[in-house]
Each structure stands twice: as structure tokens, then as C-alpha cells.
Image: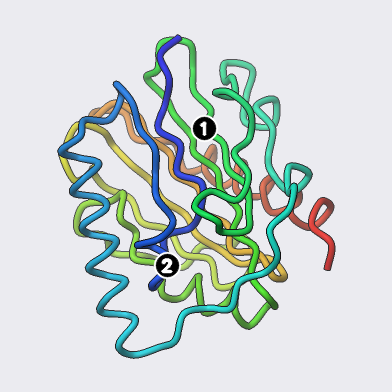
Amino acid sequence: MRSAPICVAVAVLAVAAAAGCSSDNTTSPSSSSSASSTSAAAASTSDAAQPTPALGQTGDYTAALIKASDIGPDFTGYGQPTQNAGGLPGVGQSFNTADGSRIVVASVLVLADPAAAEQAVKTHPFPKVNNPAPQPFEVGTNGLIATGMSPDNTKSVTEVVFGEGRAAVNLVFMNAPDSPPAPDFVFDVARKQDQAVKSGLPS
């Protein structure tokens, strides 16, 4: 099974430049650089208007993360959940089908309080979607969704961000260019990830 990109923290404000996102054969270096540049630029622009959200404490947040079985029988988690990537408190993991044609990247960033999580969600730059036009998304708090193509136009992408308590959740769904993720599937996975945060993250 080919590995999938693992982006562990929500890319928001100055956090975007520090978060980092590891990738491998499924994501070309040029597209990874493009996404990083987009995130950094958005972070720089947002930084001028608002301070960086206050972070929580690092730790093991596996209990707040969705499992492969919650996504579907065709999905497998790639490796173990990644904890506190780049020193940012939270957890993330990439899930993909055996042929690598469908990928879901889930990440939970833990903030100091719900107000910081709300700020992180509202300023999320949607770096995985080319020319995003975010719309309200009815999961969690202040949920937003953007659907389109990846910056390199090689994948259809749906990216979701929402708050839940002191967590900011980011979900990225990647499929073949002509086969975007079904809205019902996206909503179901997001709802289950929201529940995982509610039950697995101490208040």
C-alpha cells in the first residue's frame, strides 16, 4: 500500500508556518511546496490582523482522533497517529484505501480554550483547495467547508474545519479528479470526528 500525506495540525495563522506537513510519493514536492507557500502567505496576511491563537499543552491525544473503522471498511490508517507535530499540541493521521485512490487526513489541534479554537477555525486558509470558497458546514462550532481541486489540479479535494470545545478539527478528503467525495460521506466522517473529540478530549 502506498503511503499518504500526513498533515497533523490545522494550518492557521502563524501556526501554519510552524506546523509542517510530511509527504511522500502520493504528493509531489512541487505541490507540497505550493501548499506550504499558500499556507504561509495566508498566515502572514491573517497575522497582521489578529494574534496567533493560544495553544494548549502537548500530550497524547489519540483518544480524540477518528479511527479507520469509523471512516469505512475500505480504509486503513497509515502508520500510527502522529502526536504534537512541530511541537503543536494535537494529533493526526492519514487514512487511505488499498489502491491509494481515496485519502482522508484527520487532524485535531488543541488550543488553550474554546475562544482560541474559534479564532483558529475562522482564520483557516484552506491550503489544500485551489481558489477555495468556504461555505458554512453544520458540524461542530463555526464549521466551514471548501470543495474543489488540489493546487496542482491532480485530485478533487474537500476540506472541512470546525471547532469543538478547545479543539480545532481539520479534515481533508482527496479523490481522483473526476470523482469528488460524496457530501454525505464527508458529513458522516466529520460528525464521527466531532464525537471523537467530545468523548476523547478532556475539557
Q: Please, is residue 150 above or below residue 177 in the view?
A: below
At label 2, the amino acid type is Val
Query: Dot 2: what SS?
Result: loop
- Most extreme residue toward the bottom is 49
Q: Answer with mark 1 or mark 2, whichever residue precedes in sequence.
A: 2
Image quadrant holding the N terminus, namely top left
Q: List x then y, in percent, for residue 95.
A: 53, 28
Mark 2 crowd level (few <14, some 14–19, many ≥20, 10 Å Cα): many
Mark 1 crowd level (few <14, some 14–19, many ≥20, 10 Å Cα): many
Image quadrant holding the C terminus, namely bottom right
Mark 1 vs 2: CB contact within 8 A: no
Q: List x then y, in percent, for residue 167.
A: 65, 64
Query: Dot 1: what SS?
Result: strand
Instruction: Give the residue drawn at x 35%, y 62%.
Output: 17
Instruction: Give the residue drawn at x 73%, y 49%.
Output: 61
- Most extreme residue toward the front is 87
Marks counted in the figure total 2
**Residue 12: mark in rendering:** 2
Residue 115 relative to residue 60: left or right? left
Q: Rounded to the nearest whole Å, what is the CA distance between mark 1 and mark 2?
A: 19 Å
Residue 190 relative to residue 161: left or right? right
Q: Please, is residue 63 above or below residue 126 in the view?
A: above
Q: Quadrant of residue 92?
A: top right
**Residue 19: mark in rendering:** none
At label 1, the amino acid type is Ser
**Residue 94: mark in rendering:** 1
Q: Quadrant of residue 131?
A: bottom left
Q: List x then y, in percent, for residue 125.
A: 34, 65
Instruction: Give the residue drawn at x 59%, y 63%.
Output: 168
Residue 42 relative to residue 16: left or right? left
Instruction: Give the residue drawn at x 68%, y 65%.
Output: 164
